[in-house]
Amino acid sequence: MRGGIRVAVLTLMTLIGVGLLPALAQAAPEEPSGRAVEWQSGDDVFAAAEELTFDRKVKGGLTAAGRIVILTGDAEIEGDAWITARRVAVEGEIDGDLSIRAQEALINGEVKGNVTFYGLDLSLGPDAEIDGDVTYYSPSAAQIDKGAEVKGEINGEDFASGRGVEQARPAPPAQMRETWRREHMQERWDDQSGLSAPGYHMSASGAVFFGVFAIAFALLAPVTTTRMREGLADEWALAFGLGLLWLIGLPILVFLAAITIVGLPIAFLLLLLWPLGMVFGLIATLAAFGDFISSRIGEFGRGTLGRIVGIVLATALVWVGISIPVLGALVWLAAVAGGIGLLYIGFRTTPL
């Protein structure tokens, strides 16, 4: 039992999504960049903030994390750059390699090394200059402006199917620049309603992404999925409460850890794990909800095919729910917070 709880707690520590907190309440009227955590090791810089804007020169490498990370045109990184966030915009100069893990990313600056991207949507702006290769793992093709210059090869991999992704048609330069500056460079909390979706809209490709991983989770961990389904039916209030408690408690822990120098690395590591929360929370909800649906459709719902059909239906329902104005934010919050709680219930009751 204790071993199960330890596994659950360790699992929950990896399930903190960048976009979870905005759905809890309307943002407070404070500076957009928020409180930043930063330290330096040699010439390398480590930085994290909810909205991180980086606009200076770094003699070494840069590791950055946040909900939104922006490297302005004044930023100059002499080493490699590693960035994880929900949204990333790079307009500065990077002398080494650039590695991005994000839902969406825009590269509109100079990268002298290779570019690697893991996420949903990658765009290369009209001012992008990349001397090396561009390799991206995404369910959708990259949007590459006609003005972008890539001296190396462009390799797109669909991590859902393992097949290559064809290069998308380039978007008009003016349209791409305006879209990214509006949605990525100028997004602010006070532009959102407290009940509207917090800057997140599940696209069709995003729904497919979450659905595929929910199916994989259900097939690889059928016992845990069954326990999560039972928790969804019998302990849904407990699941949501645990997830909500975790979402509220984590920022307090991060703040307390960041007060001391010794705690800064811990706070930074927690911030680095934030993007995984949205992914795994939704995946857990889709797997449990899909298994619940398959258990209610009779003989057809039994077996592997029935479980897959149930998750497909669950994904479609959640996708539609999130797309509803006003109500969509509540659906999104319930899915993410409930998923975190269901993971705890699933691992708690699964024999090790």
Image: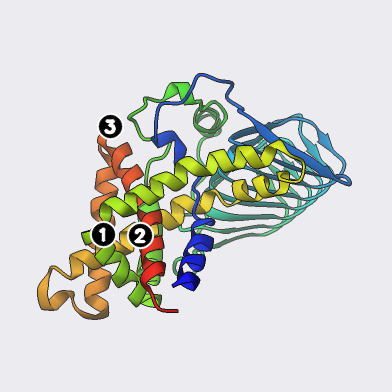
Give the residue pinned by disc 2.
Answer: 342
Residue 78 placement, left or right of 86: right
Toward which corner of the image does residue 346 lie, by quadrant?
bottom left
User: Farthest front residue?
Assistant: 2
Q: How is the image coloured?
A: rainbow
Residue plotted at (71% across, 45% down): 263
Q: Is 111 in front, or is 100?
A: 100
- Looking at the rendered image, the quarter that the C terminus falls into is bottom left
Tag 1 near tag 2, CB within 8 Å: yes
Amino acid tagged 1: Leu
Q: Residue 305 carries which label?
A: none
- In the rendered image, residue 289, in percent from the top left (x then y), is placed at 26, 60
Residue plotted at (60% across, 46% down): 271
- In the rendered image, residue 212, in percent from the top left (x then y), is placed at 38, 65
Say whether residue 323 is visible: yes
Q: Which mark is residue 232?
A: 1
User: Farthest left residue?
Assistant: 298
Provide the secondary structure element on which disc 3 rests: loop
Provide the secondary structure element on which disc 2 rests: helix
Give the residue pinned by disc 3.
Answer: 326
Residue 132 placement, left or right of 308: right
